[in-house]
Amino acid sequence: MLPSPVVRPRERCDLPTLVRSLGEQQPTSSYPMRWPLPFPIEQFIERDGQERAWVAVLDGRVVGHVGVGRPRGDVERAFLDALTVDDTAGLGIVEVLFTDLSVRGTGIGGLLLDTAVAWLHEQGRTPVLDVVTDHGTAIDVYRHRGWRQVGSIRPPWLPESEADLLLMVLPSPTGLAGLP
């Protein structure tokens, strides 16, 4: 039986381990889809506009990551259209969720997702995310946890051979005005 993981805020010193873990899991998950990235991997993990980020630690080793921020750029416009809202101030995007290969299937990814969602709910915001259509397992997990598809987007970096990204929202248990 695995010891219990601990979720804590991400620190700068976690980045080298996260870079290595992201690279090791990429061939099996295709996340991120563009690989190698056309910029430093640290910039993919620690994004401009990211408001909070957490890591999962197991036996003193960082084994997963998730961040949250506000939807930006094309994704922001797509959520505005999909949710028919005037602005995205009430939304929070879950981003850069991944786990180390050694802990895949143990629930650590779900623990990180729950942490991000709980923080967004504490802020009075509705969680949203985008996911590559080919990531069927991830989509199944999100749907099982109550996430709903509200639209799609075709970002310029997505290869022609790939289907659009799905836009998903986790409706608030109390229901926010104007959101499905």
Image (cartoon, helix red, strand yellow):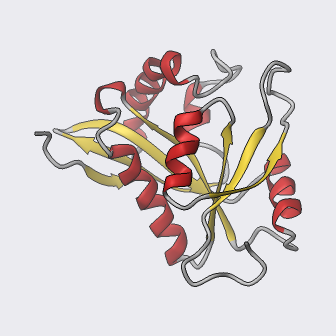
Q: Which residue appears at 79% of the width and 30% of the height?
A: 163
- Choose between 123 and 132: the one closer to the eye: 132
How many numbered discs, if any? 0
| Above-or-below relation of 52 to 43 | below
Q: Is residue 132 left or right of residue 120?
A: right
Considering the image in quadrants, where does the N terminus appear? top left
Residue 63 lies left or right of residue 148; in this view the side is left
In the image, what residue occupies the spot 65% across and 24% down? 33
Asked whether, in this view, residue 87 is left or right of residue 18, the answer is right
Q: Is residue 10 visible?
A: no
Q: Residue at x 81, y 18 (%)?
A: 161
For the point 16% across and 38% down, the residue is: 59
Q: Position of residue 135 (x, y in %)?
A: 60, 32
Instruction: Examine the image and state in which quarter residue 64 appears.
Output: top left
The quadrant of the rendering that contains the C terminus is bottom right
The percent coordinates of residue 109 (x first, y second) are 40, 44
Residue 4, above or below 104: below
Residue 88, picture quadrant: bottom right
User: Residue 36, located in which quarter of the rendered image?
Assistant: top right
Front in this rendered view, residue 146 or 97: 146
Indicate the position of residue 34 as horizontal and vertical percent values.
68, 21
- Residue 84 visible in the snapshot: yes
